[in-house]
């Protein structure tokens, strides 16, 4: 009996497919598109090891890739306005983690924008989100790259600092590099009330509802967590071999100097007083156009339900195989 002839193309195809479906680890690719230096930090969840680095300097335009292990869970965030000495001791204006360059098991000091993820073991899916429950300091977008179908990007591409209510503002200095509003607190941190912290009698999704303040965050960033029980529109699943986390995504790949540092121009009223909602610029930014997946990912974050497509290479290979 004559065996069917196998073409070199088929060998390449099956090699690629087998490699795609044998993901043994996931990589976090962290990019700084801000026009200033940031210091990303990482924190592993209970029972999982810390990543190879738990804190590092990332200059404007730089990217760093960090491998992880199956089942890893934790957080990644950006710190701003940091100064460290030769031993790694110092402090940051936002996102500080124990006054060290390497966070070494210390979490971020609020207010901080957080990327949170739990990687699946084996065929189990990953669960991920971008959370503003602890407040906001930097715009960030996260999107998965993987062969197991389409996955959602998430994040907060809007500059909430420019429309942060005065009672939630974190203000440093007057003008200049890094001056003005550098972060926006959560209502929980600002007022410490159970109704904002979803604690006490409000420690369940029935009694803890979106507040005036969490609605400001949600309208600016529809896919990000705005309060503790905001699960329905903010948690996503995927099976990916890479997650790209981009700080300060904009149309031309770089946020303009001074953007988001000026105090907002909204009227100040007491929290209990009815008020007009502050105006927060809600852009549809995209990352550099030479990488189409960047643009699609950031546009998705604004509000659409569009999914990241299956890699074009795989589709072409399949079409060629069945033709």
Image (spheres, rainbow, N blue to C red):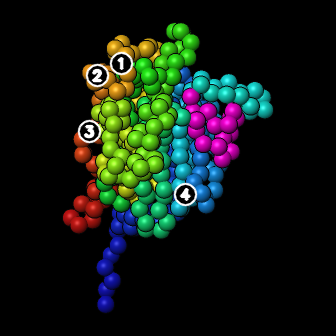
Instruction: Of the two numbered discs 3 and 2 on the same chain, state the one appearing first in sequence.
Output: 2
Name the quadrant containing residue 194.
top left
How many angstroms separate mark 4 from mark 3 (CA)? 28 Å
Q: Residue at x 47, y 31 (%)?
A: 191
Identify the residue under disc 2: 275
Name the quadrant containing residue 92.
top right
Disc 1 is placed on an element classified as: loop
Label 2 neighbour load within 10 Å: few <14, some 14-19, many 20+: few
Identify the residue under disc 3: 303
How many angstroms separate mark 4 from mark 1 (CA)? 44 Å
Q: Is residue 163 visible?
A: yes
Instruction: Of the two numbered discs 4 and 3 on the same chain, state the one appearing first in sequence.
Output: 4
- Circles 1 and 3, Cβ within 8 Å, touching? The answer is no
**Callout in the foreground (3, 2):** 2
* Residues drawn in magenta: 94-109
Instruction: Of the two numbered discs 1 and 2 on the same chain, state the one appearing first in sequence.
Output: 1
**Callout in the foreground (2, 4):** 2
Q: Where does the image place residue 257, in percent across and percent down from the top left?
A: 47, 15
How many angstroms separate mark 2 from mark 4 (CA)? 43 Å
Q: Where does the image place residue 283, in percent across and percent down from the top left?
A: 30, 26
- Circles 4 and 1, Cβ within 8 Å, touching? The answer is no
- Circles 1 and 2, Cβ within 8 Å, touching? The answer is yes
Residue at the limit of the structure toward the bottom, as seen here? 1
**Callout in the foreground (4, 1):** 1
How many angstroms separate mark 1 from mark 3 (CA)? 29 Å
Identify the residue under disc 4: 72
Label 1 neighbour load within 10 Å: few <14, some 14-19, many 20+: few
- Circles 4 and 3, Cβ within 8 Å, touching? The answer is no
Q: Where does the image place residue 282, in percent across and percent down from the top left?
A: 30, 27
Residue at the limit of the structure toward the top, as seen here? 175
How many angstroms separate mark 3 from mark 2 (CA)? 25 Å
Identify the residue under disc 1: 269
């Amino acid at each position: 009996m004559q065996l069917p002839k196998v073409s070199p193309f088929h060998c390449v195809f099956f090699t690629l497919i087998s490699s795609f479906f044998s993901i043994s680890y996931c990589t976090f690719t962290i990019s700084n598109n801000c026009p200033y230096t940031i210091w990303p930090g990482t924190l592993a969840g209970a029972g999982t090891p810390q990543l190879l680095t738990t804190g590092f300097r990332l200059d404007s335009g730089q990217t760093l890739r960090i491998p992880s292990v199956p089942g890893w869970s934790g957080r990644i965030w950006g710190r701003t306005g940091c100064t460290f000495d030769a031993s790694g001791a110092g402090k940051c204006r936002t996102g500080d983690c124990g006054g060290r360059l390497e966070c070494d098991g210390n979490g971020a000091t609020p207010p901080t924008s957080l990327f949170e993820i739990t990687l699946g073991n084996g065929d189990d899916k990953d669960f991920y989100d971008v959370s503003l429950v602890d407040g906001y300091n930097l715009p960030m977008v996260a999107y998965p790259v993987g062969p197991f179908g389409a996955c959602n990007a998430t994040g907060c591409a809007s500059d909430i600092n420019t429309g942060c209510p005065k009672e939630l503002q974190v203000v440093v200095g007057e003008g200049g590099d890094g001056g003005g509003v550098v972060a926006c607190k959560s209502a929980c941190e600002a007022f410490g009330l159970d109704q904002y912290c979803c604690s006490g009698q409000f420690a369940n999704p029935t009694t803890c509802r979106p507040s005036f303040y969490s609605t400001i965050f949600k309208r600016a960033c529809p896919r990000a967590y705005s309060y503790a029980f905001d699960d329905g529109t903010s948690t996503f699943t995927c099976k990916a071999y890479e997650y790209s986390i981009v700080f300060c995504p904009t149309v031309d790949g770089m946020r303009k100097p001074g953007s988001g540092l000026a105090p907002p121009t909204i009227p100040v009223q007491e929290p209990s007083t009815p008020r007009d909602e502050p105006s927060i610029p809600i852009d549809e930014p995209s990352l550099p156009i030479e990488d189409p997946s960047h643009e699609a990912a950031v546009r998705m974050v604004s509000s659409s339900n569009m999914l990241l497509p299956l890699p074009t290479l795989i589709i072409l290979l399949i079409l060629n195989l069945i033709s």
